[in-house]
Image (cartoon, grey):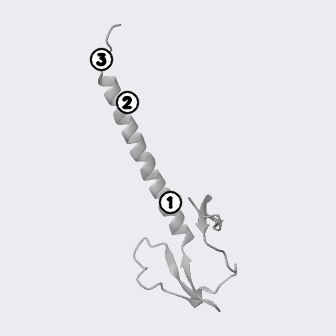
């Protein structure tokens, strides 16, 4: 369960909308990408972190929305494929059982 104090933030990438629960939304503002520095230890391939931007009051960890959506689609697709495979196995098992006359 998500605490009532959380807010829903919807992001979009490539026509896909993804809802995120966040503890708060501060300012929404444009930033200069030249002011973004690498996120220490979070720059591995496939990382959802884009970097760190220093605001007036705090550092802000930036998320790569395109990568986040791509990973969410990948995870959903893999889960769906596992479900279909499991259901296919059940269908094959049920076909293998001979009907018994009543």
Kind of element beneath mark 2: helix
Residue placed furthest toward the top: 102
Tell me, for residue 91, which label it has, or none.
Answer: 2
Residue placed under numbered mark 1 in the picture? 72
Residues under numbered marks 3 and 2 in contact, where contact means CB atoms less than 8 Å apart: no
N-term-proximal mark, 1 vs 3: 1
Mark 3: give few (<14), some (14-19) or many (20+) Cα within 10 Å. Answer: few
Vertical comparison of 84 with 78: above or below? above
Q: Position of residue 51 (x, y in %)?
A: 51, 82
Mark 2: give few (<14), some (14-19) or many (20+) Cα within 10 Å. Answer: few
Q: Is residue 24 left or right of residue 62?
A: right
Q: Is residue 31 visible?
A: yes
Vertical comparison of 60 with 73: above or below? below
Q: Residue at x 63, y 91 (%)?
A: 57
Residue placed under numbered mark 3 in the picture? 98
Q: Position of residue 82 (x, y in %)?
A: 39, 46
Q: Position of residue 20 (x, y in %)?
A: 59, 64
Residue 13 falls in image quadrant: bottom right
Q: Position of residue 34 (x, y in %)?
A: 58, 89
Q: Nearer the viewer, residue 65 or 56?
A: 56
Q: CA distance from mark 2 to mark 1?
A: 29 Å
Vertical comparison of 35 with 75: above or below? below
Q: Quadrant of the N terminus?
A: bottom right
């Amino acid at each position: 369960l998500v605490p009532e104090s959380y807010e829903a933030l919807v992001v979009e990438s490539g026509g896909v909308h993804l809802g995120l629960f966040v503890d708060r939304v501060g300012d929404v503002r444009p930033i200069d990408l030249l002011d973004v520095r690498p996120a220490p230890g979070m720059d591995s391939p496939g990382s959802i972190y884009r970097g760190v931007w220093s605001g007036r009051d705090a550092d802000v960890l930036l998320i790569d929305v395109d990568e986040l959506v791509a990973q969410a689609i990948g995870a959903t697709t893999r889960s769906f494929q596992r479900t279909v495979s499991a259901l296919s196995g059940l269908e094959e098992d049920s076909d293998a059982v001979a009907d018994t006359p009543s």
